[in-house]
Every structure is written in structure tokens, then in C-alpha cells.
Image (cartoon, rainbow, N blue to C red):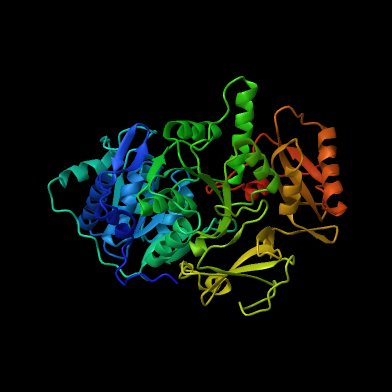
Amino acid sequence: MIAFPDDLNLARYFLFDRQREGLGAKAAVRFGDRVWTYDVVAENARRVASLLASRGVRRGERVLLILPDAPPFVWTFFGVLTRGAVVAMGNPHAPLESLAYLVAYTRATAIITTPFVAEGLRAYVESAGSEVQVVFVVADLATGDDPAQRLDVPVGGWGSDFVDLSLELEGAAPAEITVTHRDEPAIWLFTSGSTGEPKANVHSACDFASSTEAYAKRTVGYRRDDVTVSVPRLFFGYATGTNLMFPFAVGATVALFSERPTPQSLANAITKHRPTVITNVPTMLGKLLEYDAELTRAGASGLDLSSVRFSLSAGEALPGPLLSRWLTRFRSDVYDGIGSAEMFHIYASNRPGDVKVGSLGKAVEGYELRVLPEEADSAGATPCAPGEIGILWVRGDSISQGYWLDRERSFRTFHGSWCRTGDLFHVDEDGYLYFAGRNDDLLKVGGQWVAPLQVEECLFGHPAVAACAVIGVEHDGLVKSKAFVVLRAGYAKTSSMSVALQEYVRENLAKYKYPRVVEFVDDLPKNDRGKVDKKALRARVHVSP
């Protein structure tokens, strides 16, 4: 257990301590050609704290950030923490109904967002029962735009121009850092919401500091000279950690781009900033390989990842064949790991000098993991034998206080200091973890259980497959497995290809596990965490007789 003082404000831990260490003039944030030092970020964070205080936002109240990946996200994030308020984050590209749900659910007293979102939320915020006291409006910036640009706030005085208000504070005494307890709520992290609306994990300040020390510093080794870039967006806890908190904790530099992550936009960021650490997801790793092959076929130079010390992968399973292709092409390590909003961040991972392809590595220092039978109702149950699949339980200092307004679900998930993840795993004789999917993802096909993840990993081994997802669909009262497949360039979407893929699975797995239906698609839908959205696939599926 890592000891922290009672007085633990995350703005001090991640930001203001860098000034104390003499790093104030060092580059903290890059955005296009623009650079902001730690001194400037700290000054802007104090202004945010002053603005919140001037509008009556108090310690412990929620402030909802609905912002793109641009510099204002950074100083508003730390400004809220400086004030002692609690950060909650939403996706600025989510449907307005989903954002309205966050406004009501968080009972936020302040919102910081873009003009489009502010105007869209106006009716919800002004409705009876809303506790929002102020809406700060920040420009929706393209990469490289000036965050100091002033804007026309919506008609009728709706929302307050953040820049205008900040200018009013020039020359005023800087806001003090609010004293907050290490066990005091600091940030809410949302579940992915794959079933029903997302729920918030209430996390204390010490959760984030503990994970930073254990994972970022001691396991994967963030360094002061690192430059980081991320595919997942900052509102997602995975990226909030890897592309904001962790680099700031060591005095590194964060490079942001606000456009939707694509192979092209990511390649541009890599060329521009020469990052040493990339936060990635398996789907984008596959797309980068395809984009690289497309470049070389066109006679251009392939992707240059020579600056990258390592990439991180999480959020969904990284198939062994895909990782092998990546390592063969780029000779650049990928540290695949697993974490959750319930534990804030990654608690099991591959790491420098210890990468086992196909596995999720071993427990991060400070975490204890157990694979227990599905029926286990406590962490004291007898663990599964090596190779036997069970439910992963995890214990560590970053565990959530529970789900906001969901006591019943909290009791099912949290058992004292243990979290029952609901993820299926097995361990090998050497203690390496292997993901087998979610317990509620298993399909019963022809009376036998099929794990979609196992079929997906098998399909990834076929040279024609660039990406795939397997779901269960009902037809004539029976469940069938269906594979959605993205083919690599040069392969045709033909019936013979469908048969070839089915036969490939039959040859490499038990015959009953092959996908009964194969549908070729140009791309797979993603949710706002960058994961393949199987809920969307199920919603649009149609199986012919």
C-alpha cells in the first residue's frame, strides 16, 4: 500500500508540484504549433478555480466537463480540482439526450463545454430540477487554433464566455489550492454503459495517485522526456490517465489533437510531435497496419514509429496474431493491459522486458488478482486451477467507493476491498493472465457454449482478416453466431471467402464454434470509448433464412 498524506489535492500532485520541482518553464501541452508550459497551465488552472468560486461552485460539488481534446480541457480539469470540486466528464460528440442524462445524474452545479453543446443542453439545464448554476462556454477548436479566441455566446446571454471572464481576473490574486482529504471524492468515472445508462464510479483522490505510482511510474515507466499522444479521447478514464495525469506526474509533455482519431489524423500527430508513448486500442493498431500497407503499395514511405518507446493497448482484447503482425512490422513494443472504471486504471499488464503475446501480463505492483469460479460469492473462494476459466477478482488501492445512486449494483460488484469484475480469465502455470471475454457475452449455440472472443482471435489469424466481431443472433428461436468481418486490401467479399473463413475456424477450433453467418463490412462501429460497439451490431443485424 502506498501511503499519502491526509491533505491530497490532485491538482497539486499532478500539476503544481511540477512548478515546485523547477519544471515551470518546461513544455506541458502541445496543440498544433502551439506550446503551453507548466507555469501557464498552472496559471490558467488557478483562473478556472477563481471563476468557479466567483459563481458559487463549492468544494465537493460536481463540475461537468464536455470538451474536445484541446488545451482548455487540461486547465479546466485541473482548475476544478484546484477548487476542490469534483470532475465528471462527458463526450462532446455524444447524443444530446445522453449528455442531458449526465447533467441530471451528476447534479452538476457547473458545466464547461462548447457553444454547440451548450445550446443543445439549454432546455435541459433550464428545466425544473436542474442544479446547474453556470455554464462556461469554450470555443470548439480545430487542432492548432488559439484557445484564447473570444466567441459569441448563444443568444440571450445563455452561457458565459470563458475567455472573457478569464480576462476580467487578470491581475487578481491567484486562487488558493483547496485543502482536500485523500479519501475525498475527486473524480467520477463512468462505466461504458453497454447495458442501460452508464453509472459513475465515485473515486477518491488517493485512487489516482496510487495508480499513477504503481502503474505509470513503476510498471511501464513514464519519463520526464516523454511526449504522449492518445487515440482514446481525454473524457475516457483510460486516456485521462495515460495522456494527462501520468505524463504530468513525471513532468512529460502531452500532445493533443482535437479531430476524430483516424489512421490519417494519428499519423499526422505522430509525424508532428514524434511521440515516445502512444495510447492506443486494438482496433486502431489494426487500422494503422492497413494504412501503412496502403502507403507502401502507393509507393510512399510507410509509417515512421522510430520515436515511439512503447504503445499502450487496453479497452478490448488484443488478438495475438494482430500483435505479432505489429511487432514484425514496427519492432515497437505494445504493453497490453486490462483495467476498469471501477479500479480507475490498469491493474494487470505486459511491461518492459516482459511481454507475452496473447496474454495480459501479470498483476501491476500493489494489486492482487484471483480467478475464481463463477458461483464464488467472496474473494476467499478456492481459485481456479491454471488453465481453468473463471471470474477475475481484483484488489488494490484505486478501488471505487461504489456506483453513484446504485447501491444494489455496488453490492454485487464490490466486496470489501475486492472488485468482482465480471470478466472471464484464466492464468497459466507462470501466472500470466488470459482474457476469455465477458461472462454475459457467452453464446449457447447448439446446446454448447461459445466464447465470441475465442472465435474472433481465431479469425484474426487468417491472412484476409483486418478486423472482426462475433455476436449471437436469434433465428427461428435458435441462437446462431455471426461474424462481421473487415477484409484486408486485395481480398474480395465473396461467398467463397465466407466459406473459407468458416472452414478456417472449424479447422482451428472445435467444429461447433465456427460462425454460422459471415457478413463483410467496411468498418466496425465503435462506442465513445473506442471499443467495437456490439450493441450497435446487434441492433442492425438481420439473418436471412
- Vertical placement of 118 versus 175: above or below? above
* Residue at the (29%, 67%) spot, across then down: 180
Place residue 382 in its image quadrant: bottom right
- Which of 41 and 450 lies nearest the eye of the viewer? 41
The residue closer to the viewer here, 458 or 25, is 25
Q: Residue at x 55, y 56 (%)?
A: 193
Q: Is residue 321 above or below residue 394?
A: above
- Residue 85 higher or lower than 411, as above or below: above
* Placement of the C terminus among the 4 image quadrants: top right
Residue extending farthest to the front is: 353
Horizontally, residue 23 falls left or right of residue 483, namely left
Residue at horizontal 81 percent and vertical 37 percent from the top:
498
Q: Is residue 199 visible?
A: no
Query: Relative to residue 507, is residue 216 depicted above or below?
Result: below
Would residue 101 appear left or right of 447 to someone viewing this image?
Answer: left
Residue 76 place in picture, x, y as percent: 31, 50
The quarter of the displayed image where residue 459 is located: top right
Name the side, left or right, on which 172 lies relative to 302: left
Pick whichever, 324 or 391, lies toward us: 324
Quadrant of image for the N terminus: bottom left
